[in-house]
Amino acid sequence: MDISTTQTESLNKQEHQQKADKKSIKISRKTAIIIAVIIAVGTLIYVYKGLFIAATVNGSPISRLAIIQELEKASGKNLLDSLIIEKLVQNEAKAKKIIVSNDEINGEIKRIEDQIAAQGATLDAALAAQGMSMEDLKKQIIFQKEVEKLVADKINVTDEEVAQYIKDNAILIPEGQEETTNAQIKDELRNQKLSTEANALIATLKSQAKIRYFVNY
């Protein structure tokens, strides 16, 4: 074997070795990336485990998905219907350019606080007992005010209606309590009208809307 042949074989071996080394490096980098991703995902799951796991019992996890599934079985239909109604009212209020101001929201919160305080309790305690936050209360107030404004022209109560109610129900008003009693009756009649008109509004909005269900409860 001559020298040139030996040199050629040596160069070929070196070239093959270099290719093998490069392939090994590539595999190592790929493996390192996979390991890094696994570690990152594992860390996120641990840090934010409350997003996936509600509790553990002797080390056995109860997933939040399991809770959601049970809640959907129990009240999924009612909750979905409530959210649909809320969306319909929001859209109608927006179309009619109805806005609920912060002053209106705060005024209603103050009224509720005063009522609860008169019973010897606090608003925070009442919300906690209902599993609600202040934001939940504000959303409820906004929804209520939007409905009231949408049917405002249909819930006025006249003095004649109050007088007729007193007559029909044979209500005896103590002397000096006429104004207070009339105001109470007017509020009661207004609330009755509000309930009736709100139900009618929601029924109309539902009938006019295109609602597609992707989940059947």
Image: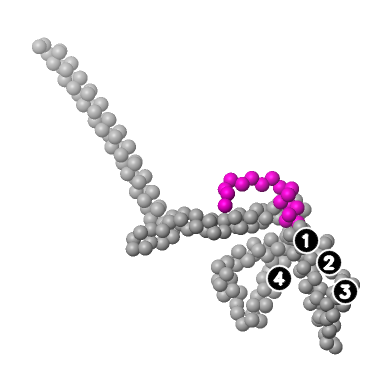
Residue 164: which disc? 3
Of the residues under marks 2 and 4, which one precedes in the sequence? 4
Q: Counting residues from the N terminus, which is met first, the one under dot 3 or under dot 2? A: 2
Disc sitting over residue 107 in the figure: 4
Choose the circle earlier in sequence order: 3 or 4: 4
Q: Give me the disc on residue 197.
A: 1
Query: Which stretch appears magenta?
Result: 201-217
Q: Mark 1 or mark 2, which is nearer the start of the sequence?
A: 2
Look at discs 3 and 1 and give the one toward the viewer.
3
Q: Is residue 202 magenta?
A: yes
Residue 162 in picture, x, y percent from top left: 85, 74
Q: Quadrant of residue 10?
A: top left
- Badge 2 amino acid: Asn
Which label sits on residue 165? none
Disc 2 residue crowd, few under 14, some 14–19, many 20+, Cα 10 Å: some
In space, the residues marked 2 and 1 are separated at their CA atoms by 11 Å
Taking the image as drawn, is residue 159 in sight? no
Disc 2 and disc 4 in contact, CB within 8 angstroms: no
Q: Position of residue 80 (x, y in %)?
A: 61, 54
Mark 4 belongs to which amino acid?
Answer: Gly
Residue at the spot of label 2: 156
The image shows residue 177 at horizontal and vertical percentages of 82, 85
